[in-house]
Image: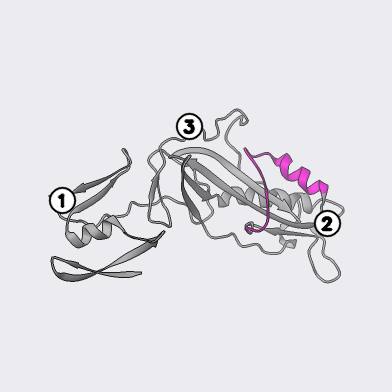
């Protein structure tokens, strides 16, 4: 809410935040009003205040967060702009395709082994970044649209070649026009999904063969902690 204050006897207005009965103000807003420098030092994770320097608006860093569904391979120094205004810098990608369960980089996306045009058109969800500051560290989740499509295409090939969900290499439909398999590329918060990493096609296969007809919710996320890449996490649920 807007809070009226006076600065050297002159009225000013700042946005205030009432937390547990106390009023708080953004330090940048105070610096802007009073005229002293406020800056964030990402390397030392320190707020730097310099009353001898005038306030300057900080220019946001260019973000490399992917938005078009293309493959994104993170690099040290990449900066991701978060919805809360934080610029999250990637500092370590040594785990990318290099952990105890991965033999090497993933290949290209699956190619059709059935008639994909027989499936309902599926729109990719919007690019999304989630930023969390927890006691255990600073986390970043980037929706990986490319790997989400890997999950989708794998499932489409399974459904288009299974006798319970296909006919003549095409997805089967019920009497009311409902598809034997429905695919959703995001998971609502009320649905509890199963997570696995790294990528294993067998995880999709095993779930599909356990209940071929149905609705499948799926999504993939790149996970970082304190700037360090942790994993690409695959989430799926069949109902």
Residues 197 and 34: in front is 34
Checking the image for residue 202, the label placed there is none
Q: Secondary structure at mark 3?
A: loop
Name the image quarter holding the N terminus: bottom left
Q: Earlier in the sequence, mark 3 or mark 2?
A: 3
Mark found first going from the N terminus, 1 or 3: 1
Q: Quadrant of the C terminus?
A: bottom right
Give the Cα distance between marks 1 and 3: 40 Å
Q: Secondary structure at mark 1?
A: loop
Which color scheme did the rendering employ for the protein?
Answer: one colour
113 relative to 184, above or below: above
- What residue did someone put label 2 on? 166
Label 1 or label 3, whichever lies nearer to me, is: 1
- Magenta region: which residues? 189-210
Q: Name which residue lies at 45% across and 51% down.
A: 65
Residue furthest to the top = 100
Alpha-carbon span between mark 3 and mark 2: 42 Å
CA–CA distance in space, label 1 to label 2: 70 Å
Disc 3 marks which residue? Answer: 94
Is the C-beta separation of discs 1 and 3 under 8 Å? no
Q: Which residue is mark 1?
A: 51
Picture residue at 72% right of the left edge, 42% below the top: 203
Rendering coords of residue 180 (x, y %): 81, 60
Dot 2: what SS?
strand
Q: Position of residue 192 (x, y in %)?
A: 68, 52
- Which of the two residues, 194 or 103, is positioned nearer the viewer here? 194
Q: In the image shown, does 186 or 31 lie closer to the viewer?
A: 31
Q: Is residue 112 visible?
A: no
């Amino acid at each position: 809410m807007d809070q009226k204050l006076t600065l050297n006897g002159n009225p000013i207005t700042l946005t205030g935040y009432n937390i547990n009965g106390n009023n708080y103000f953004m330090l940048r807003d105070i610096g802007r009003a009073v005229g002293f420098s406020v800056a964030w030092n990402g390397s030392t994770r320190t707020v730097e205040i310099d009353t001898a320097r005038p306030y300057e608006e900080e220019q946001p860093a260019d973000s490399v967060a992917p938005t078009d569904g293309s493959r994104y391979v993170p690099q040290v120094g990449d900066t991701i702009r978060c919805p809360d205004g934080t610029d999250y810098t990637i500092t370590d990608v040594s785990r990318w395709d290099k952990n105890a369960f991965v033999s090497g980089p993933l290949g290209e996306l699956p190619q059709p082994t059935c008639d994909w045009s027989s499936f309902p058109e599926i729109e990719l969800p919007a690019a999304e970044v989630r930023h969390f500051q927890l006691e255990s560290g600073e986390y970043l989740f980037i929706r990986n649209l490319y790997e989400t499509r890997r999950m989708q295409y794998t499932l489409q090939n399974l459904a288009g070649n299974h006798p319970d969900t296909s006919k003549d290499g095409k997805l089967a439909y019920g009497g009311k026009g409902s598809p034997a398999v429905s695919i959703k590329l995001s998971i609502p918060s009320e649905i509890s999904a199963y997570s696995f990493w790294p990528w294993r096609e067998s995880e999709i296969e095993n779930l599909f063969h356990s209940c071929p007809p149905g609705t499948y919710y799926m999504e993939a996320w790149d996970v970082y902690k304190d700037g360090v890449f942790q994993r690409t996490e695959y989430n799926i649920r069949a109902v």
